Amino acid sequence: MLRFISVFGALYLPPVELSDEQIKALIINYLMRRRCWGKKYQNRQKVVRYLGQEVLGNGNEVSRCLDELIDKGWINSMKKGKTISLNVSAKKSIMQHIEEYSTNDL
């Protein structure tokens, strides 16, 4: 069970330890919510910093899993590796991965 902590009047969810596959699903879900497919991209550092707050490891785990997704071909790296977007041609396998490893607790 996840516990919310009140910090300065706002609810704060402490970092959670997740498996690598769950972190990958979290990264993909983040990009899908922002509709970053193909030519629409997101800043890589912003993704790592934002998701690093939800995952234990201060972004190191997120960055490593992001590199694995790029090597797998599910995420495209653009502008000399500074921006990322989801690969449209791998949409079917991405959706299967999301359904299998999605975490509803976060």
Image (tube, helix red, strand yellow):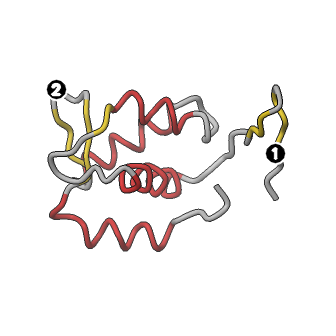
Element under disc 2 = loop
Q: CA distance from mark 2 to mark 1?
A: 38 Å
Amino acid type, mark 2:
Lys
Q: Picture coordinates of residue 29 (x, y %)?
A: 43, 56
Quarter of the view holding residue 79: top left
Quadrant housing the N terminus? bottom right
Number of residues whose C-alpha sits closer than 10 Å to that of mark 1, classed few (under 14), some (14–19) or many (20 or more) = few
> What residue is pinned by disc 1?
4
Please state if 23 lies on the left or on the right of 71 as rendered. Answer: right
Name the foreground residue: 68 vs 14.
14
Q: Picture coordinates of residue 76 (x, y %)?
A: 20, 45
Q: Which label number is shown at residue 95? A: none
Residue at the front extreme?
9
Name the foreground residue: 65 vs 87.
87
**Cβ atoms at labels 2 and 1 below 8 Å apart:** no
Name the foreground residue: 50 vs 76.
50
Compare marks 2 and 1 and give the one earlier in the sequence.
Answer: 1
Residue at x 26% of width, y 55% of height: 74
Residue at x 73% of width, y 42% of height: 13
Residue at x 81% of width, y 45% of height: 4
- In this picture, is 101 found above or below 80? below
Q: Picture coordinates of residue 35 (x, y %)?
A: 31, 53
Element under disc 1 = loop
> What residue is pinned by disc 2?
80
- In this picture, is 53 found above or below 40? above
Number of residues whose C-alpha sits closer than 10 Å to that of mark 2, classed few (under 14), some (14–19) or many (20 or more) = few
Please state if 101 lies on the left or on the right of 14 as rendered. Answer: left
Please state if 33 lies on the left or on the right of 76 as rendered. Answer: right
Amino acid type, mark 1:
Phe
Residue at x 30% of width, y 38% of height: 42
